[in-house]
Amino acid sequence: MVISRKKSYAPSHMKNSKLLIFLGAIVLLSIGYGLGARSTGQQAPLKPLAQMLVAKPPYVKPAQAVRYEKPEPMKFLRVSRDPNHKIVSVDTATVRYEPIDGSDLKVDLIGAVHMADREYFANLNQAFQQYERVLYELVAPPDTRPTKDRVPGTDPFSVLQASLPEMLAFSHQLDEVDYHAPNLVHADLSFEDLREEARKRGETAFTLIAGMALDFLKVVQKMEEQQDQLKDVSVPGLLEMLTDPNAFRQSFAETLALMDDEESIGGFTTLTPYIIEARNNAALAVLDQEIQAGRKKLAIFYGAAHLSDFEGKLLSEFGLKRTGVQWNKAWDLRKDVPTRSPFQQLGSIFRLFQNADSPQRPTE
């Protein structure tokens, strides 16, 4: 006998809150920050990435096919819990890869979350000093280096990227990472490159929007399927999200725990060839150039959702093997963050965008 269970529906404000948290998690893990035409930053192109990215990157493969043993799958982002099953931290991985043949090369994948405790970014800045080159993500023209006096974009993802750190009382990656360190190298696509990639794949604005709409419906369905997993999780309403960063942080962390970073950007498969694959190929093309230039200690600093694809290509096409993992605490949820009034929180978010129509400030 099959007994159907009556489906329970959460209040609409809770569904809206969960959807915001889910979309925020996607932005946090996979969608690199973009700088538009109004953004400040140095622009001294080194190499035209667009020429390298519409096809497979120019990997230098061995004369014989690379034979390797695929390691056990791993997560590049984890949550740590206390004995009461409450999340106490969100951690990102730094994973080392070395050649199977034993030659002197070290490549580290450094996973990122784009908003975190200030100490997390300070520790990353210190760690970056050990590398000859650190390849970083930024959807922007070649060799763009973000500055702290940038102005935010007005597209939905930029608004979400800029407002979430304020709502969660975290620091912003672009404010804390020292992108002007001499060993940091831009290794990503521009918006123009992504448009060209879409054109070559036969995509149009209509097909992309239609695909994303279908993906969005799948995401909503996935959230409904995960309702049982979230039944013990307190999902804050919009007012609580604005006033209590502690509650918002816990709900956000639980959403990260449910997301599989090996999936296609949380279910948005339409964007995967662009947000993950094409941009990863850009970084690997630059990595290959650095290896051919004789550099021996390199790192790729990208969102955690990119790292599974990176690892597969480092193993199968660069002849490397995984040799070590180190975990970095991005969110320390044991810290108690003071609550704020809705007016304070909304005022802080408003100030992020009040300069959007201001004259562009000089570059550094």
Image (cartoon, grey):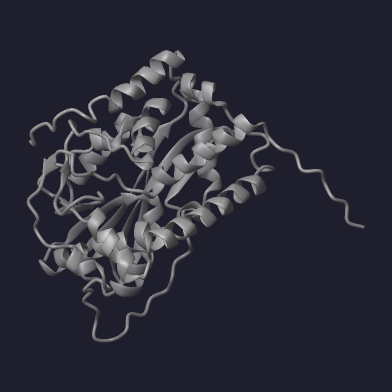
User: Which is more toward the observer, 45 or 38?
Assistant: 38
User: Which is more toward the observer, 171 or 92?
Assistant: 171
Work out whether 121 lies above or below 192. above
Work out whether 137 lies above or below 91. below
Q: Is residue 139 among what the camera can see?
A: yes
Q: Is residue 309 left or right of residue 139?
A: right
Q: Residue at x 42, y 41 (%)?
A: 91
The percent coordinates of residue 140 (x first, y second) are 21, 50
User: Which is more toward the observer, 16 or 154?
Assistant: 154
Farthest residue in the right direction?
A: 1
The percent coordinates of residue 210 (x first, y second) are 48, 58
Farthest residue in the front direction?
A: 206
Work out whether 102 lies above or below 1. below
Q: Residue at x 47, y 42 (%)?
A: 23
The percent coordinates of residue 166 (x first, y second) are 37, 26
The percent coordinates of residue 245 (x first, y second) are 46, 24
**Figure disc tally:** 0
Q: Is residue 264 among what the camera can see?
A: no
Q: Is residue 92 left or right of residue 248?
A: left
Give the quarter of the figure containing the C terminus.
top left
Give the quarter of the figure containing the N terminus.
bottom right
Q: Residue at x 26, y 73 (%)?
A: 55
